[in-house]
């Protein structure tokens, strides 16, 4: 234990180097703005306006809310870098380390200005200016803002806070206000931010009398990853897991097959990163999304046929440390005591999702279906899966019965075959049972293979290709490039038949 008699040195961090290093925490623009919005929600804001102002290198971004605001001392404390994450917090608090506002802001700009007022206090302003810190080599927070920041702070009502980012060196450095290209890039970032916020805060936006979040005056519409109101979404009974006396709610959803969705619904449900990326567990803390789909190291890979499985986990903020939440609130680690239960829920949800996914392809094997209706058939022989064109399909049967076949009908049949390849079923079988995939002609008699090779040889020669070149091309042609032993014997078979 330390005592008063201990000798020591005080080694303070070198302000310019330390504050620059805080810029490298790993935020992008989307997660940085979301972190600032967290502060607004913690302050009970019901209206949050995000303003992107384009002016080349003089562009700025502001987040303005109608929350409870801060007194002068509370503002100074909010500008302090770091807080004790072990200290008890309000259960609705969305922060943890006391770094979010600062590190999120520093990651995008070199000057962050915060102006705030409560219902009973005046407007107070403080500013972190990284260039000023570098010049003074001290942890100085300025008591002044800027003319542009004053414009934003004038929009604060009876109470609230405005966080303003200026000198956006990592976003607009080298840009020109009059450049249409630079402006378009800036606008593209706005669109991406909107999609991210619609995902991260969708539960706040969906609540009755919930939060109104606007970007440049346009309301952000929530993105519900679970399609919870769609009649074809499956929603098994939620489970409650206990951990350290706290409840962890786990709620599984199996989304509809795309045939049950309109094209717009299907596109929207893919989310900012697409269907495959957004499968797995969605982790929320106090309604705020932290992890937008991940199998959390539970031995499950993201696969196409699992994409309909999305599982919601709701955590209280008292379990932050045990779940390993990082500063950016974008990663989490499953505690050992919950791994078995979550893996079980994940497997069950995955299996149901696969059943829905395979529905379209599985009709190939339905016992009660008319085989003639399907172009492709799945076959199984000696444990190997292969696919065949259904010779009893009306169009295929018509071609086979005509001698010679009608060219227009043949073209129609080829088009039908192209459009009806059972891709979902092939992907599913290949990923679940890769060892059961048959190699080309594995189930065919050798005579059938040679007959096809002879027909292809004659077709090549008919186009003017020499005998030697025709055989060489067969070596490179699918699927004979993997059946070289057949082609090696082909010259002898041709000679035996008198084919030149």
Image (cartoon, rainbow, N blue to C red):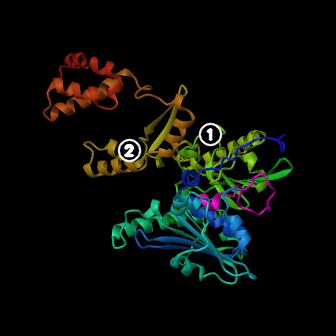
The answer, for residue 232, to whether it is visible in the render is no
Q: Is residue 94 magenta?
A: yes
Q: Which stretch did the figure color magenta?
A: 83-103
Percent from the top left, x then y, of residue 225? 62, 59
As drawn, the residue found furthest toward the right would be 245
Is label 2 in a helix, a strand or a loop? helix
Magenta stretch contains residue 267: no
Instruction: Classify the position of the N terminus by image quarter.
Output: top right
Q: Residue 141: image x %, image y %?
A: 61, 66
Query: Within the image, what quadrant is residue 383 found in?
Result: top right
Residue sitting at 14 percent across and 27 percent down? 466
Q: Note whether residue 83 is visible.
A: yes
Q: Position of residue 333 (x, y in %)?
A: 68, 44
- Which numbered dot is residue 397? 2
Q: 10 Å neighbourhood of mark 2: few (<14), some, or many (≥20)?
A: few
Q: Which residue occupies 67% across, 73% down?
A: 211
Task: Read off the residue under disc 1.
Answer: 300
Report the number of discs: 2
Tell me the CA gap for discs 2 and 1. Answer: 44 Å
Direction from residue 409 to residue 263 in the image, left or right: right
Label 1 neighbourhood size at 10 Å, few (<14), some (14-19), many (20+)? some
Vertical order, 113 against 420 (above or below):
below
The kind of secondary structure the magenta stretch mainly shows is loop
């Amino acid at each position: 234990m330390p005592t008063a008699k201990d000798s020591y040195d005080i080694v303070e961090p070198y302000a310019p180097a330390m504050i620059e290093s805080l810029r490298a925490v790993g935020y992008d623009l989307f997660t940085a703005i979301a972190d600032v919005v967290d502060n607004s929600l913690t302050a009970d804001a019901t209206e949050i306006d995000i303003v992107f102002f384009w002016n080349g290198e003089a562009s700025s971004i502001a987040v303005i809310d109608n929350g409870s605001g801060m007194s002068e001392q509370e503002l100074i404390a909010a500008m302090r870098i770091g807080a004790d994450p072990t200290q008890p917090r309000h259960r609705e608090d969305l922060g943890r380390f006391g770094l979010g506002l600062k590190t999120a802001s520093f990651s995008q700009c070199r000057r962050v200005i915060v102006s705030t007022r409560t219902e009973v206090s005046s407007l107070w302003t403080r500013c972190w200016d990284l260039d000023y810190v570098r010049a003074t080599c001290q942890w100085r927070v300025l008591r002044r803002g800027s003319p542009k920041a004053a414009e934003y702070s004038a929009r604060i009502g009876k109470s609230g806070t405005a966080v303003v980012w200026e000198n956006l060196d990592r976003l607009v450095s080298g840009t020109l206000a009059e450049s249409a290209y630079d402006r378009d890039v800036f606008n593209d970032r706005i669109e991406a931010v909107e999609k991210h916020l619609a995902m991260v805060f969708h539960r706040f936006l969906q609540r009755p009398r919930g939060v109104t979040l606007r970007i440049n005056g346009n309301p952000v519409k929530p993105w519900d990853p679970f399609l919870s109101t769609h009649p074809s979404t499956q929603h098994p009974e939620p489970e409650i897991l206990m951990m350290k006396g706290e409840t962890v709610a786990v709620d599984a959803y199996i989304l509809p097959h795309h045939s049950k969705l309109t094209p717009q619904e299907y596109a929207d449900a893919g989310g900012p990163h697409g269907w495959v990326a957004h499968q797995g567990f969605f982790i929320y803390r106090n309604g705020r999304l932290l992890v937008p789909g991940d199998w959390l190291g539970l031995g499950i890979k993201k696969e196409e046929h699992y994409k309909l499985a999305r599982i919601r986990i709701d955590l209280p903020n008292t379990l932050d440390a045990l779940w390993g939440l990082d500063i950016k609130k974008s990663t989490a680690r499953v505690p050992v005591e919950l791994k078995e239960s979550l893996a079980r829920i994940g497997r069950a949800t995955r299996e149901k999702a696969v059943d829905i996914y395979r529905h379209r392809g599985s009709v190939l094997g339905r016992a009660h279906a008319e085989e003639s209706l399907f172009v492709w058939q799945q076959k199984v022989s000696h444990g190997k899966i292969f696919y065949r064109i259904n010779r009893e399909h009306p169009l295929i049967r018509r071609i086979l019965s005509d001698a010679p076949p009608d060219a227009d009908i043949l073209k129609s049949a080829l088009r039908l075959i192209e459009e009806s390849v059972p891709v979902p079923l092939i992907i599913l079988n290949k990923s679940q049972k890769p060892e059961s995939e048959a190699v080309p002609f594995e189930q065919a008699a050798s005579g059938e293979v040679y007959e096809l090779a002879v027909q292809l040889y004659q077709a090549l020669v008919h186009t003017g290709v020499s005998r030697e070149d025709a055989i060489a091309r067969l070596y490179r042609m699918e699927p004979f490039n993997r059946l070289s032993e057949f082609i090696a014997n082909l010259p002898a078979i041709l000679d035996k038949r008198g084919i030149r």
